[in-house]
Amino acid sequence: MLKIDNLHVTVEGKEILKGLTLEIPTGEVHAVMGPNGSGKSTLAHVLSGRPGYQVTGGSVTYQGRDLLSLAPEERAREGVFLGFQYPVEIPGVNNVYLLKAAVNAARKHRGLPEVDAFEFLSVVREKMRLMRMDESMLSRGVNEGFSGGEKKRNEILQMLVLEPRLAVLDETDSGLDIDALKVVAHGVNTLRAADRSLVLVTHYQRLLDYIIPDRVHVLVQGRIVRSGDKTLALELERRGYDWLIGEAA
Amino acid sequence: MSTALLARVKDEYGALCERLPASVVGTERRRSALERLCEQGLPATREENWRYTNLRVLERARFAPALTPTEAIADLPAPLEGVARYVFVDGILCASPQVAPDAGIAVSSLRTAPTAAMRECPSVAALPEARLALLNDVFATDAAAIRVQSSAGTQRVELVFIACAAAQVGASYPRVQVTLEPGARLALVERHLSTGDVANLVNCAVQIDLAEGSQLTHYRLQQTGSRTAWFDTLEATLAKDARYELLAVSTGGLTARSSVHVRLAGSGAEVALATAALGDRLQSQDTFALTEHLAPRTRTEQTFRGIASGRARVAFNGKVVVREAARATDSRQSLRGLLAGPEAEIDLRPQLEIYTDEVRCAHGATAGMLDETMLFYLLSRGLSPEVAQRLLKWAFLEDVVSRIELPDLRRRIELEIAGQMSEGASLKELLG
Ligand SMILES: Nc1ncnc2c1ncn2[C@@H]1O[C@H](COP(=O)(O)OP(=O)(O)OP(=O)(O)O)[C@@H](O)[C@H]1O
Ligand SMILES: [Mg+2]
């Protein structure tokens, strides 16, 4: 699904990713962990095409294509989804408008007709129930005045409605209470499928109790310094990152 | 330049004065308005509060009104449900609603029904910003006079003004006078359109008189054609506990200038002015809004949202004056501009003059570009940059548009704005 090879990325003249290599096979769920400032969000943003990140070396291949040559909206339409660490508030843009616009943009891209408004709404309602979100949130501005946890749930709602091929969820578990964590994990688990890959960026092994990853990677100072199975997360929980930081240098 | 123009105003008035209806504006008053205009001169761009108005269009225009309205207008927008509609072509009434309005309200054309008394000699022309109202006094060909009685219940009226004649043929002078008796309520929709793509000159004057405890909600839509020069002067006086809500949406015209003066003359009077202006290509959209607090416990709320794209210039000059007697007043101002093009221009000027203590003021003015993080968020969901930008511009205006309480009207304004922003109509689809 996704192949990142020796990726170098600079932000405002400062190199953040320093030769990152990572492969996510189709149908797998991978977790990326690492200390604050190690470059996890940078990686997520680069994958989604956010301006301001300069790729100075390496390559990213998504479903056999050069991902980096696509505009952000093209990546989204091709099935790449980024769950933001800090979801953006857009007052005045209705949540349901955005959902519908996003779905229709992807459908148009695939040569499909627009969704039926009525059917669409019932699908959205069903997913909202799954995310335990109040229906009134549909008619509110995108993330406008949402609590931290509500914003994260809204990100997952968007993902559920868009049904991406590759989802990168940047700290979707941060700021969630224990019940909300289960709700979000359940939402993510419903999307697990043989033709879909998920990347979970997280600081907490707890999330991985609910969404069991196929692989766990540790990102330190712009590189993947260690990969393993789900037990690696437990080991990190016990030992912290110090023992790996030496390896990065 | 101004003197040459004034000489033309005089000549054109002299040639026409016999034919101007005295029931609309008395001959005496027309003459004195002309005199005062000559004393004060026409507005000029070098004046502080006219800096952003394109006044050059006056040089080419004919001031005399187009006296013969063209044939009935074919493609009027559908009437609003439950709202009595009156249509004026080049300032002159040409269609009234089939069903007569309520007994508690009188809507008349002063050209044909001169009985309705016009409030004599208002203070309008005292202000240098209101000089173009004098020009309306000189040439007005008709006036819509609305009077609502105390006991009438909430009334709804729509006035549609259509500019038809080309500027070389004659100007149009829409004129409106609203009087609410104590406790009366009115929702007034005032809409300005033009036919085809003719260069028209429109010079509108509106006078509003709100008696104690009355309430007026006033929707003003300026949607004239892309070559129209639209000028406007509105004066409102509020008695004790009266409330005036003005929601203005200006999208049309090549150049549009509105001068608004609200006098909070009675204690507890309240005004909420919300303006949305959209400028694109070479358009200029300029609003001067003055609220004068003359009595205690009066309140002002000014909201402006303006978007300038292309090479457009969008300006809002919001001035609040708190006079000595106006203790314990409250004034809020939120002015925001969005620059949507490298060659566009936004000018926001909040001004505050206070001559008393005990005043609460919250003022803010910001102009900037589209928020990059919002834009990226929308792109990351697959929206094209064009749609994303339009959506954000749209959202920017929501603070004003969402206040429109007539659902039918609100929807139409939303569609109008969507249409103004997009050729591809994708935003319209979103709204559907
Ligand atoms: N726009 C920017 N300008 C300068 N430095 C930046 C910018 N964006 C990110 N950085 C720096 O890049 C480094 C990596 O940031 P990034 O957000 O990717 O970390 P992270 O691993 O997601 O951290 P966290 O766990 O705290 O979310 C940090 O040192 C950060 O300060
Ligand atoms: Mg991060």
Image (tube, helix red, strand yellow):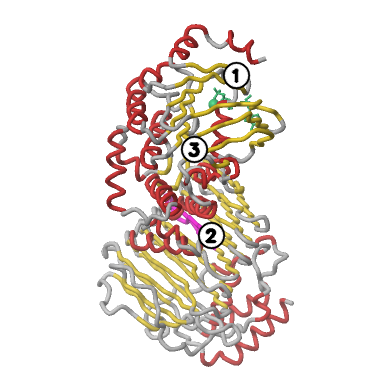
Give residue A171's position: percent from left, percent from top: 47, 26
Magenta stretch?
B260-278
- Image point 34% across, 31% down: which residue? A187
Query: For the stretch drawn in magenta, what is the main secondary structure?
Result: strand
Chain letter of disc 1? A
The residue type indicated by label 1 comes to Val
* Alpha-carbon span between mark 2 and mark 1: 50 Å
Q: Amino acid at mark 2?
A: Ala
Give the residue pinned by disc 2: B277
Point out residue B108 in the picture as x, y percentages from the top left corner.
Answer: 36, 78
Measuring 44% from the left and 12% from the top, which residue is drawn there? A231
Residue A110: image location, x then y, percent: 43, 52
- Give the vertical position of A35 relative to B100 (above or below): above
Q: Is residue A114 visible?
A: yes
Task: Tell which tag, 3 or 2, sits nearer the viewer.
Answer: 3
For the residues carrying marks 2 and 1, which lies nearer the camera in this image?
1
Q: Helix or strand or loop: what does disc 3 sit on?
A: loop
Residue A88's disc is 3
Identified by mark 3, the residue type is Val
* Secondary element at image label 2: strand
Whichever of callouts 3 and 1 sits on the residue coming sooner in the sequence is 3
Q: Which residue is mark 1?
A: A220
